[in-house]
Each structure stands twice: as C-alpha cells, then as structure tokens.
Amino acid sequence: MSNKVWKLNKYCQLLALSAALACLPYAAQAADAQFNDALRAANSGNIALLQQYQYAMQNDALGYYPEYWILNSSLASQPADQIAGFAQRYPQSAMAEKLAADYVEEKVKQADFAAAQPLLQYVSNPDQAETCAVAQVRASSGDPLVYAEFKDVWLTTNAQPESCTGLGRMMLSSPLLTEQDRQQRLWGQLRAGQSGLAIATAQSIKMNLSLAQLNSIQANPMNYLWAAPKATPEDHAYLIYALGRLADSDLNSAMASARRAAEGAPADVQRALYRTVGYIGGTTVMKNNFSREVLQFLDASYGLPFSPEEAEIYARQAIRFSAWESLIRAIDGMSVTQRQEDRWQYWLARASEQRSDGASKRAAQAIFKRLAQGDDYHNLLAKDHVGQSYSSLPGNTQPDNADAQRLSQDIHFSRAFALRNVNAPDSYINREWNWAVRQAYLKQDDGLLLAAAKRATDMGWYDRAIYAADRTVSKHNYSLRYAMPHQPYVVSHSQNAGIDPAWAYGLMRQESRFVSNARSHVGAGGLMQIMPDTAKLVARQMGESYNPAALSDMNTNIRYGTFYLSMIQRQLSSSPVLATAGYNAGPNRARRWQPDDQGIAADQYAESIPLTETRDYVKHVMTNAAHYGVLLGQGAQSIGKRMQTIPMRNAQ
C-alpha cells in the first residue's frame, strides 16, 4: 500500500470515529470515557471500530484496552510474539498478565506447549487453572520440579479445572513418581468412583482394570462385596471401588460391611478400605451428620500416606470429637507447608496441651505465645490461651503527602480510579484495583496502599479500601481496614435489637464489605445481604408491610439485618457463634451441627462446620467483631467472650 493511500485510509477511519463520537455528549468524549464505547464495540465483535478506538485512546490511562480486546478476540490463533509484544509495551500491567495467562491456557488446550513457553515469564499471578496450565508447559520442557510441586493436584479427587486434570495425566509418565505414588492416586480415584481416570492410573503400574467390571460393581456394590475375591491387586482395586460406591449411597451399610470386606486382604489394602469409609463419611456430613465411627475408621487407616484433603478431613473429625491423639496423628500426616499454617499450629497446641506430660504442655504454650503475636482468628484464640487481652490496635498510620503524590502518579491505581469514574463493569475495575494493590504489596509499599485506601474510603468505596488496607506489611491503619460507615444507624439498631454493634459490624463487613447495592448469586441484597424471604419474615415480626424496594434503603437494611440476627441468636441458645453460622447457612443447619451428647468448645464447633464457606465465615466474623470492639471503645477484647461453649442440640 502506498503512503498516500495509507494516509487516506487513516483519515477516513478518523472521520468515521469522529462521526460516531459526535453523537455523544461532550463529557463522554473526554479521555477515558471512551472506554465503555470501546467495550461495546468489543462485545459486538466490531474489530474495525476497536482499531479506531485504539488510535484515539492511545495516550489515555485506559488506552491499552482496545488492543487487548482485539488480541483477545482471536486469542488461540495469535502468534506468541503478538502477545509478548503487548506484554512488553505494557509491562507488569493487569491486562498484559491476564492476556499472557489466557494465551498459555489456550495453547495448552491445543497441546501447543512450544508456543506457550515464551509467555510464561509474563504470568505472575495465575489462578488455579492457569497455574496448572503453566505447570504443563514446564513439564513438557522437562522441568522435574513440577512433579514434586504438584502432588496435591496428583492426589486431588475433588473437581478440578481441566488444566489440572491434564497435568495429572502428564504426571503419569514421570519416572519420578514411585509405584506407591501411583497406588495412592489409584486408590483415591477408585474411592471417588472415577473409573476412567483409575483405569489410566492402573495401566501405569501394569494393572488391567475392566470398565465393564467397574460398571457391574457400581450397579450393585453390596452384592459384589459379599463374595469379592481378594487374591490380586486387581481384586483389591475392585474391592476399594465397591466399598466406595456403597459408602457414597449408604454410609451406614458401608461402615457395617467394611471390616468384613477387609478380612483376608493385605494390611495396606485393609487401611485403604478403612480410609475409603472414613474419608467419604467425613466429606458427607451434610448428608449423614457427624459420626464417631467415621473417626474410628480414619484412625484404623493410619499408616497409609495422607493426601492434603484426607489429612484435613481426619483433623476436623478428630477436633469434632475431642480426639486429641487422633488430631496429633492427622497433623503429623500433613505436608510440612500445611502443618505450618497458623490453623494447624493452633490445633497442634490445643491437642498437645491435653497431654499429661509437662513437655507437651510447655510445647503447647510456646506455640500459643508465638501465634499470639498476630491478630487474625487463630492468633486471637491463642491470645486467650496465654492470658493476653486485645485492647489496642497495631497502628493508625496515616498516609503522608508524598504517598498521596505517588498514588496520583501510579498507573495501576490510575486505571482503577479511571474505570470507576466511568462506571465500567466491576470485573474490570476490581481486576485493575487488585492488581495495583498486589504490585504495591510486593514492593512492601505500605504508604501507597494506605494512600489508596484513604482515597477510596473518602469516596465511599469501602470494599476496595479494605482490600488495600488489609495488605499492609508493617504500617497499618485499622480505621481504614475496619471501616465503620453509617455508625449511628448500626449502633442504634443493634442496641434496639439487643445485640453487640461490634458483632453487627463484623458480620456486615464479611457480608458486603459495605457495598450498599451488593447482590449475591442467590438474591441476597444490601449491606447485610438479606434474602427476600427473610425480609418478609422480619417485616411480619416487626408488624410492618413488606416492600421489596425498602431493602435497598441503607437504614431499613441495617434495621432488618440486626433484628434478624437477634432473632436467630435467641433461637440458637443465645450463642453468637451459632447465630453467625445460622445467618450464613440457615438456623436449621447451625442447630443440626450442634453436638448430640455433650457441649463442645466453640472453636471446635467452628472448625468442624462441614461447609467451607460457613466455616470461614464464622471465623472472619468473630475476628472482625474483636477488632470492631476495640474501635468502638468497648475495652479489652477477648474472642473467647463471644465464643462460649456450644450446648447440646436439645439443651435450652
């Protein structure tokens, strides 16, 4: 193309873009306001218009988006150098990292590992699926460390991204994985009913399993168990599969059949059979309730290596039944990294202090003292064990003018603020904000994080302010980290409902991060994330007519939420822990998880909650409440004061 023709084409493109923009209000023509117009062009697949926006926005903070959308529209067919070029033009940026990570995923799906290889250097914050895709590329190039790093993927039988399943298949060919590694994977897959994966794993240790036989067993596992042969490794595999299928459909029958099924089998196969019943029983508490017999089967399986998920199930069952020696064994079976988590260090200390010897008690106190230095959930629990109250916040550092100046010059935060100013979709805003926070955190730039949190708080953008303030390393501001908007309403409505305002704030922070228009995927809304049916119930209890629009009103949402929290607390033995669990999962579930025979400590109840979301929710709300207690001037805080013993289900 001649230079004259190229200039004419470019002039025509600019005329077309000018004509399109001329129809918009003047304010929308300002720099970053073109983002939403370009996004509409991207969503409609209008590449020609995107190219025009790319030219028009090239000097804007958000100017890389049109080019990103163009490349992303045909990502799988792009040459690697195009993606690398984008990453080099916009180094260490949110969308360059995302584009590179998505490209690696696409190329791994095509098994084109060579094309993905040059992009690995630009992937610095991968999610689980992207992590496994990167690992596949590394494995394809002969990196032996992959197989040691991803044992959790190798042994996981829960649902995983396809890239992780694919990584597991690649690992089958590694000479670094022993026959014991392969047998552990096989038995886990058989227990989970993953017949296709199990057949492939079995083949890697020269064991031939029949899909027809597995299907026959699945149709009637009890019938197979009555007369199952136990002579060969294949027989043992079918036996584990049969007991797993029976436990999945009828746990009580499986527990009744397990010891008979184990008779005459080798010791390690017996343990695998007991692990099968114990693991399935431990992961189906929602359906089958808690059972001490499940713990006994996990105890009987001790001696086989534990996968990370198996060790956690064993530990939680032991915690539920105060089986302290079992808990010590479960923690001992964890990986070094897993065992060093604050959670498991706390429970190791809880178990060790139950022993009668002085050395164990001293070891427990040493762990508690070390943990008591922090201020998260297990740290606050540890403070109680060493008699420390929590009365002053770690700091109230304010960002200075230099921090504010650096914030205004930071391209990552500038993009996030620009996107919010033009009401871009939350997915884009949050990605840029979270990326900006991560870059500051990696540099341990607490001043920049606090400046960002302060500016966001001043804008009423509390969720992102909390996200930034939460990640400071040495300089902290807990007034930013634990925001208290609408304080007169929260305090007065809490007091009217007879509940602690610090607890109400702790729950609200966890529910919505103070986003007043927050909506959950199940329809809960507002600051306290109230379900419509719950709001109808509360309105009726308060003698009011229900108006759906009222839930969007901040005052009504807080009033209804605090009333409901008070109501379910009265229903649940006046326990804040039970009421918190009930607020998240429903009061009937919280009650169902109470013990049958005797009360248990609240930390044991919380740790053994079978729903991960609710388990974490209770911990966060109790932690938040302690911090808000200090901020509200309630004096020295003890998390234990809110976590009294959980009574038996039928106790009043």
Image (cartoon, rainbow, N blue to C red):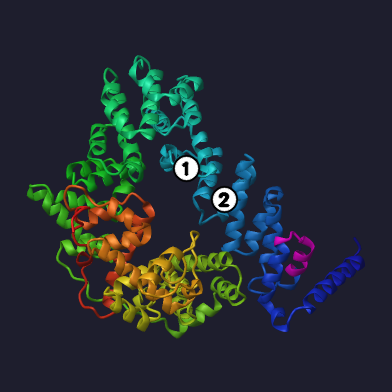
Say which element carries label 2: helix
Residue 395: where, in percent of width, then height? 31, 77
Q: Which residue is mark 2?
A: 120
- Which residue does the image show at 49% across and 50% down from the upper left? 128
- Give the label, 1 or 2, closer to the camera: 1
Q: Earlier in the sequence, mark 1 or mark 2?
A: 2
Residue 52 inside the magenta-drawn segment: yes
Residue 335 visible here: no
- Residue 453, percent across and down? 44, 76
Q: Is residue 600 above or below residue 66?
A: above
Q: Secondary structure at mark 1?
A: loop
Name the amino acid type tagged 2: Leu
Where's the C terminus, which quadrant?
bottom left
Which residue in the protein does label 1 denote? 159
- Magenta stretch: helix, strand or loop mostly: helix
**Image quadrant of residue 51?**
bottom right
The magenta-colored residue range is 43-54
Residue at (32, 44) in percent of width and height: 285
Residue 105 lies, in percent from the top left, at 59, 47
Q: CA distance from mark 1 to mark 2?
A: 25 Å
Q: Quadrant of residue 635?
A: bottom left
